[in-house]
Image (cartoon, rainbow, N blue to C red):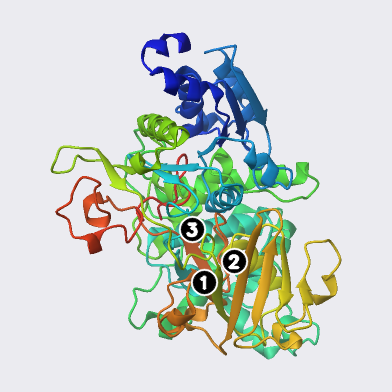
Amino acid sequence: MAANLSGVLIENTRECVKQSKILVVGAGGIGCELLKNLVLTGFNDITVIDLDTIDVSNLNRQFLFRKEHVGKSKAKVAMESTLKFNPNVKIQAFHDSIMSTEYGLNFFKQFSAVMNALDNRAARNHVNRMCLSADVPLIESGTAGYLGQVQVIKKGLTECYECQPKPTQKTFPGCTIRNTPSEPVHCVVWAKHLFNQLFGEDDPDQDVSPDTEDPELAGDAGKSAMEKEASETAVGGIERKSTRTWATGTAYNPHKLFNKFFKDDIKYLLSMENLWKKRRPPTPLEYSDLPKDTKSETGMRDQRVWSIQECSDVFSTCLSKLRDQVHQQGDGVLVWDKDDEIAMDFVTSTANIRAYIFGIALKSRFDIKSTAGNIIPAIATTNAIIAALIVMEGIKVLHGDFDKCKQIYLNRQANPRKKLLVPCALDKPNPKCYVCSSKPEVTVVLNTEKFTVKQLEDKVLKVGLGMVAPDVEIDDGKGTILISSEEGETEENAEKHLSNFKITSGTILKCDDFLQNYNLNVIIAHKDKLEEEKEFVIVGDLSELKATAETPNGVNGGQEENKQEEDDDLMVVEDPVEEPVVEQRKRKADDTDIEENKAKRMKLTSIPEESEDDVVIL
């Protein structure tokens, strides 16, 4: 099939394609289509890297995989399947993370172009920086249902992936999740936390119960806790018993657990009278006295809304099965997975029971899976279209025709010109970008007296700023090393506060990531307390500090990418996906009548970062 393209590509393009060496990062929905396209276009030297293994849920859209491949490396199976199109092509496959130290600057320099087919922001940031350091063109891509986009990135000529701020994540206070849910998503989050408390890795910040002492006493917990003498060894002077310890002691008795979470805990909430002055109070449920629901139980199990009695039955069944799984692991921990039938049934049943108690609309298992897994269905045809566009832009890149390259958006509905694909002129680099500018720097607002060196490394540098192995030196004229990427060298600094090193407003930290060949000056701005209980705020430009401190629009402190976890009592979820009107967000390349100042201000923010296969939509 590949040989037939000799009559399609002109001679110089055909030779350019044959001589090029391409790196494909990701072998999922877009990656499978992309590898097939590359081989059939005539590319002879391809390297693919992907850390994931094949799951059953991949088979409906990642056509290089079959049922017998489940559990195997995506990269290696994709290589084997692609070679069937043309056995003479050279393909290397790595079952590994692109962020591994093995894939450094020299690794990236060997390629003519890099093509991204990723599904998370952290890896995208990393590949973006590696391509900038190696001066290798990058073709970035993503899909979200029927939406998609392709972007060419070239050092010094176009915006890099991090030139414009990405949409910040929406947060819910933990007290809303525990005490006053008002939306289905609150109940789903609560149900996932309950799963972790009973069977997974317990996190005190994700406590599902309003009580303050022994879970079995829920209704009287507050009163009895106050009457007891304070314990010097207990948090807040009150001795607490973990929910899991109590549940294990009951042998995960469904009757006791149901009444604890859906009757006693609710009664305790009702005793907090101030909560219900302007809210509808919840209604406790008794395990042996459930409402008689007349809803039909016909239809597909995933698509219909379960009755409360059915939810109770599923809850009991799941408790037994999950308890057995924990025991089989030697009393280990289970990891919640949307594709695990039992775990998903548990979350569906408990979320709906809680929703019923608080007068919130119940949802089908399908809807709850979409919410709990933070996904929208991937569309195979969207992946195919985007993969084709990547190759088309890639050919321009290989020819050096960057002036002809476009950023292309795929819409769900045709625009007034009856076009689904909207090409846009590429933006120039942002002169204030803290990644690709000539003197990258960024301001971080935090409380230096409470913020530790470990928090700076993990939450600000690694999560907020996307570094992998940072080294940090204080610009104090002494060359004080605050953080070293060499294991153990600065371990004694980890739990010390920044103020212990005389770091305050105006202090400059020289940060360096050897793997990414990335240097960044971090300017510290001390503030006693940040709005909305944030731990820190990242501001792109020092001049924006005042405005940002008043209305933070930087990176939300303490919120890790792709981990739907609470931090500082905040629940992280994404904003809804909206249908874009691309022409209003970015100027079309051929629309000279559109005002210049309307062009290129925002990237297609309606496509979330976890794009391509599984996309965050909450």
**Neighbour tally class for label 2: few under 14, some 14-19, many 20 plus, Cα within 10 Å:** many
> Which of marks 3 and 2 precedes in the sequence?
3
Residue at 17%, 51% in the rendered image: 592
- Screen quadrant of the C terminus: bottom left
Residue labelled with disc 2? 206
Percent x, y of residue 24: 55, 34
> Which of marks 3 and 1 precedes in the sequence?
3
Residue labelled with disc 3? 162
Residue at 35%, 49% in the rendered image: 426
Q: Amino acid at mark 1?
A: Gly
Label 2 near label 1: C-beta < 8 Å?
yes
Percent x, y of residue 27: 55, 32
Q: Amino acid at mark 3?
A: Glu
Q: Is 312 on the left or on the right of 322, as rendered?
A: left
Residue labelled with disc 1? 174
**Neighbour tally class for label 3: few under 14, some 14-19, many 20 plus, Cα within 10 Å:** some
Q: Which SS class for mark 2?
A: helix
| Cα–Cα gap, marks 1 and 2 | 8 Å
| Cα–Cα gap, marks 2 and 3 | 32 Å
Q: Which SS class for mark 1?
A: helix
| Cα–Cα gap, marks 1 and 3 | 30 Å
Q: Is 386 on the left or on the right of 314, as rendered?
A: left
Percent x, y of residue 226: 65, 89
Q: Which SS class for mark 3?
A: loop
